[in-house]
């Protein structure tokens, strides 16, 4: 398998992320009251994905994944604090707290994509058949991740087309990291558990400190809890079915 073929396969996984925004073609202008349910769905999807990452990393190196988990949470918490301290921020025409929330969701999912790209490259380093299976699994897994991003962006005024673009953008590290991980698999594979933990820690922080508090401000707690739990279980079931 050539490096070019690995790049194309990983690029396909990145493009699949954009499919997660397509349901909003039917709901292009959700009202503000839908924000609670949207944030709950996004929180559940990210929580389920984080649990899957921790489990996968734990099988490889429990210490590495735990260190990555703590580092990821600290990094995102520090980034959020800096954004709040440095004044007004914009995400297109959106300003203030909503802009920070959108910057954070895109940033966190982009960080997550680095580990997925390494995973694809390492898998192809273990053989073409394994690489194809893992690439297809990650492509399918990326669709609800694109939905999670869009659930935060669209209700806050971002168009469906731009949500597709931002979803794909968040996954572009996958083809960029897959090729070096494929070419230097022995160097990248030991780093994967810490990377998985880092991505999980970043997403867990985003769920606990941003998405869920925002959801409970505009929706009853029991609805937020129910929607989040269902979304998390669904994401875990999808990961179990694929991998």
Image: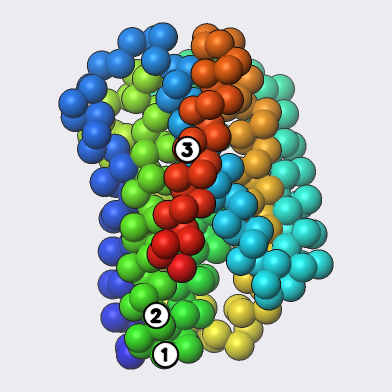
Is 18 drawn above or below residue 209 in the view shown? below
* Quarter location, residue 208: top right
Residue under numbered circle 3: 231
Q: Is residue 201 left or right of residue 162?
A: right
Q: Position of residue 160 (x, y in %)?
A: 25, 30
Is 243 drawn above or below residue 131 in the view shown? above
**Residue 95 seen in the current view:** yes
Q: CA distance from mark 2 to mark 1?
A: 6 Å
For numbered disc 3, what is the local secondary structure?
A: helix
For numbered disc 1, what is the local secondary structure?
A: loop
Asked whether the residues under the numbered discs 3 and 2 touch, taking CB atoms below 8 Å apart as contact, a structural biologist would say no
| Mark 1 Cα shell of 10 Å, populated few (<14), some (14-19), many (≥20) | few
Residue under numbered circle 2: 131
Q: CA distance from mark 3 to mark 1?
A: 33 Å
Residue under numbered circle 1: 127
For numbered disc 2, what is the local secondary structure?
A: helix
Asked whether the residues under the numbered discs 2 and 1 touch, taking CB atoms below 8 Å apart as contact, a structural biologist would say yes
């Amino acid at each position: 398998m050539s490096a070019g073929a690995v790049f194309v396969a990983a690029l396909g996984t990145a493009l699949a992320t954009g499919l997660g925004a397509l349901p909003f073609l039917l709901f292009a202008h959700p009202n503000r009251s839908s924000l609670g349910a949207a944030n709950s769905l996004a929180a559940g999807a990210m929580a389920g994905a984080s649990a899957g990452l921790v489990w996968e990393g734990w099988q490889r190196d429990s210490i590495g994944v735990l260190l990555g988990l703590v580092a990821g949470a600290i990094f995102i918490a520090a980034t959020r604090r800096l954004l709040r301290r440095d004044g007004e921020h914009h995400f297109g025409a959106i300003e203030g707290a909503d802009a920070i929330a959108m910057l954070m969701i895109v940033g966190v999912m982009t960080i997550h994509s680095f580990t997925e790209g390494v995973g694809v490259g390492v898998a192809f380093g273990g053989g073409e058949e394994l690489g194809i299976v893992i690439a297809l699994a990650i492509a399918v897994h990326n669709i609800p991740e694109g939905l999670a991003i869009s659930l935060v962006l669209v209700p806050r005024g971002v168009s469906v087309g731009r949500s597709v673009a931002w979803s794909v953008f968040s996954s572009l590290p996958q083809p960029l990291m897959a090729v070096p991980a494929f070419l230097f698999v022995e160097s990248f594979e030991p780093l994967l558990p810490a990377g998985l933990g880092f991505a999980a820690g970043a997403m867990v922080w985003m769920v606990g400190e941003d998405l869920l508090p925002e959801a409970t401000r505009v929706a009853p707690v029991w609805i937020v809890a129910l929607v989040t739990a269902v979304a998390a279980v669904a994401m875990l079931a999808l990961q179990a079915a694929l991998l």
